[in-house]
Amino acid sequence: MAAKEKKLDPSRLPRHVAIILDGNGRWARRRMLPRVVGHREGVNRVREIVRAAGEIGIGYLTLYTFSAENWDRPQEEVAHLMQMLERLLEDELEELDKNNVRFEVIGRITQLPSKVQEGIKRMQEHLSSNSGLVLVLALNYGGRQEIVDMATRIAEEAKIGRINPADINEDTLRIFQYRPDLPYPDLLIRTGAEKRISNFLLWQAAYSELYFTDLMWPDFKRREFVKALEDFAQRERRFGKVRE
C-alpha cells in the first residue's frame, strides 16, 4: 500500500515552480532502449506533474520542454520531438480543460513547425478562460536569447523616442520579457543529476530556490515533486537581506 501523502502547508508553497526536464535519453539508454522511449515516458511524467501541481495548489508551472540548443540534436530525434509535441498539444486539450488549467508558452515560437504553432494557438484560445494552474511550456527557449530579444525591442523603442535610455531600469526590462505577466519562479527544479540551469530563465531565476535531483525525468513522479516542495518549505528566503 502506498504511503499517505503528507499534507503541505499552503502558506509555504511556492507560487511558481519551474522545472528543467532532464534525463529522458539517459533513462532509456540505461535500459538498453531507444532514446525515443525515454521521451515518451517523459511525456507521462509531464501529465503526472501537471496534474499534481494543480491538485496541490501551485499557481504557475513552467516546464523547459525544448531549448534553443536542442535543434543541434540529431535531425531524426528533433523531428520526433516535434511530432510528440504536436500530439501532446492535441491529446491533452480536453484533460487540461477539465482540470481548469490555463496554457501559455515562452520562446521563439515563430521558428517552430507550423503545425506546432497551430496547436499552441488552439490550446491557448481554448483554455484562456480557465482560472486554475497556469501551465507554461518553454519551447525553442533560451534565457540568453530572451535577453537579446528584450534588448532589441528596447533599442527599437528608444530609437523612435518612446523610451529614454536614461530611464531604463529593471521594471522596463520586465515589460519586454516574453511573458511579463508571469511571476518570477520561486522554486527551480532540475532532474537528471546535473547541477546547472542551462540557459533557463536567467533573468527570472535570479532569486529562485534551486533543487537538484539525481533522478532522471521519467522517474520524477508525484512523490518526488512533493519532496521538492517540502524542501522548499523549510528554506528561509531573504532576497539579499539579513534576518531581523
Image (cartoon, grey):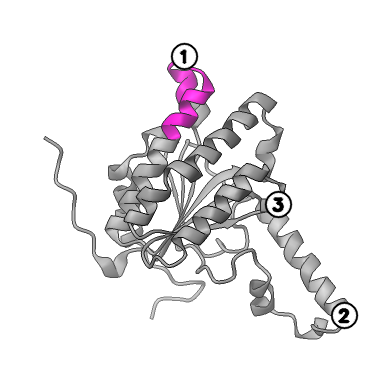
Q: Nearer the viewer, mark 3 or mark 2?
A: 3
Under circle 2, the secondary element is: loop
Measured Cα–Cα span from mark 3 to mark 1? 36 Å
**Do residues under tags 2 and 1 come within 8 Å of each other at their CB atoms?**
no
Image coords of residue 150 (percent x, y): 73, 66
Q: Is residue 31 magenta?
A: yes
Horizontally, residue 29 falls left or right of residue 139, namely left
Q: Which residues are magenta?
A: 27-42
Find the residue positioned furthest to the left. 1
Q: If the image is split into quadrants, where does the N terminus sit? A: top left
Quarter of image, res 161: bottom right
Image coords of residue 31 (percent x, y): 43, 17
Give whichever of discs 2 and 1 has the lower sequence position: 1
Under circle 1, the secondary element is: loop
Q: Residue at x 49, y 33 (%)?
A: 23
Q: Residue at x 69, y 27 (%)?
A: 75
Residue 160, numbered label: 2
Crowd rating for badge 2 (residues with CA inside 10 Å; few <14, some 14–19, many 20+): few
**Do residues under tags 3 and 1 come within 8 Å of each other at their CB atoms?**
no
Quarter of image, res 78: top right
Question: Disc 1 designates what residue?
Answer: 32
Image coords of residue 9 (percent x, y): 24, 65
Query: Identity of the amino acid at label 1?
Result: Met
Q: Residue at x 35, y 49 (%)?
A: 95
Residue 110, numbered label: 3
Measured Cα–Cα span from mark 2 to mark 1? 58 Å
